[in-house]
Amino acid sequence: MDASTIGFIAFGAVLFLLAMRVPIAFALAAVATIATFFIFAFRTGTFMPERAIRATTSMVFSNSFDLIHSYDLSMIPLFVALGHIAYRANITTRIYDAAKVWLTRLPGGVAMASVMGCGGFSAITGSSIACASTMGRICTPEMLRMGYDPRLATASVAAGGTLGSLIPPSVLFIIYGIFTETSISSLFLAGILPGLLTLAGFILVIAVWVWKDPAVAPNTDKRYSSAERMQAAIAAWPAVLLFVVIIGGIYGGIFTATEAAAVCVSAAVLIGFVQRTLTLRGLWDSVLETCVQTAAIFFIAAGAKIFVAFIALTGVAGDIVQMVTDANLSLIVLMIAIAIIYLLLGMFLDPIGIMVLTLPLMIPLVESYDLNLIWFGVVVIKLLEIGLITPPVGLNVFVIANVVGKEAPIDKIFAGITRFLSVDIIVLILIMSFPMLSLLIPMGAR
């Protein structure tokens, strides 16, 4: 059995283990290690276990150490810590508070404020699941108490939570940049326009939905004075400041993405202590949660690094490129096929798992078509974002369902999600058709 065949079998084995709910870090590392052993053991035609053990051990440890020494990897704990600290310092929800004060009088205004709040939360935390979980606990119960239709109250937050994948800083962009050796700063900048376009589309969906069926979002008698509006807007300055430091610093060439993360973590701690919204206990809990979440991501990254080395050893990626070349597929057909693959996987797997599983095979294929890896990264993240709200598994939908319980059955949430999915599909088509939507800002950066 040649190395390429072993590679295809190993890929199938990983999918089987994932279907059996085996943790992806273990599935990738175990399959890659065992398969690598067999490749080295039978390389000369006879079984030589001693040689195979040495070669396999060397590959596993060398790739793990290479990952540990990656400078870009330090961004993950920094941005994860920023999200936890900003949340405990009551910074992440201030965009929602301000938007609610300004938009409450509009039909569906609280739902619109929820989407804007999700965008603001995402601009600090970079995590879709965390965004959906946190904003779901704040926004959804409030909308239900106001008499909002459960479909609108839940779907708006579930869809808004996906903005954490695209609006920088995004953990998915960091992982993509590390495994494709692409500029993470450029990826962050590339996600801005598509992210804002998606956010605007979600707000438009709410406006049209409420206009056609006013009963889904009853008007409220709550009124705010001009002074209260200004106070709410001013109170949101810490969240705006952190976003400006990250994006402005990177765009202006003042900071690298890692430096911007470190500066923002320090700023969030300082703001929290000065405003007395962050306690030492809260800071300690943030550190502990950061360690747990970062460790999980690092284990996945380590398993993926070993799997990438195994794929390179087998030559599977080259075989796939050759197959596609022989088939003479057009770029449009190729991108449609890639989109279908990601959408199907997104129905069952988590975004990080999909990315580390597919990138070793997709990147050589994309490079053979001479496509821009930054643009392709935005396309991939957008596809993963769609997967977060696509049935039957849509992780964000299940997060919201757990928050609201029996008040909104999961079938109602999915019924409301379809309207927001249409926006995602339209934005995806625009990104794929007009690459400058994602490349314009990175090209203008210093």
Image (spheres, grey):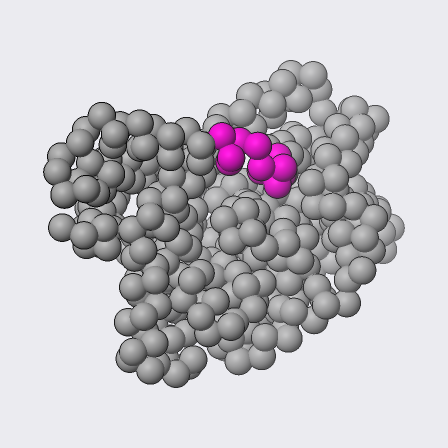
Q: Quadrant of the C terminus?
A: bottom right
Residue 375 as seen in the image, left or right of residue 34: right
Q: Quadrant of residue 50?
A: top left
Q: Closest to the observer: 299 or 209?
A: 299
Q: Quadrant of residue 406?
A: top left
Residue in view at x 51 percent, y 72 percent = 370
Residue in view at x 41 percent, y 29 percent = 61
Residue in view at x 68 percent, y 53 percent = 185
Q: How many marks?
A: 0
Q: Closest to the observer: 345 or 63?
A: 63
Residue 220 locus on image (x, y percent): 62, 58
Residue 164 as seen in the image, left or right of residue 188: left
Magenta-colored stretch includes residue 252? no
* Stretch in magenta: 65-76
- Do we see residue 315 in this rendering? yes
Residue 395 locus on image (x, y percent): 38, 48
Residue 208 as seen in the image, left or right of residue 405: right
- Do we see residue 354 in this rendering? no
Q: Quadrant of residue 266?
A: top right
Residue 214 as seen in the image, left or right of residue 397: right
The correct choice, above or below, for 97 with respect to 155 in the image is above
Magenta-colored stretch includes residue 67? yes
Q: Closest to the observer: 24 or 243?
A: 24
Chief SS of the magenta region: helix
Residue 110 locus on image (x, y percent): 61, 56
Residue in view at x 65 percent, y 69 percent = 439
Residue 302 locus on image (x, y percent): 43, 35
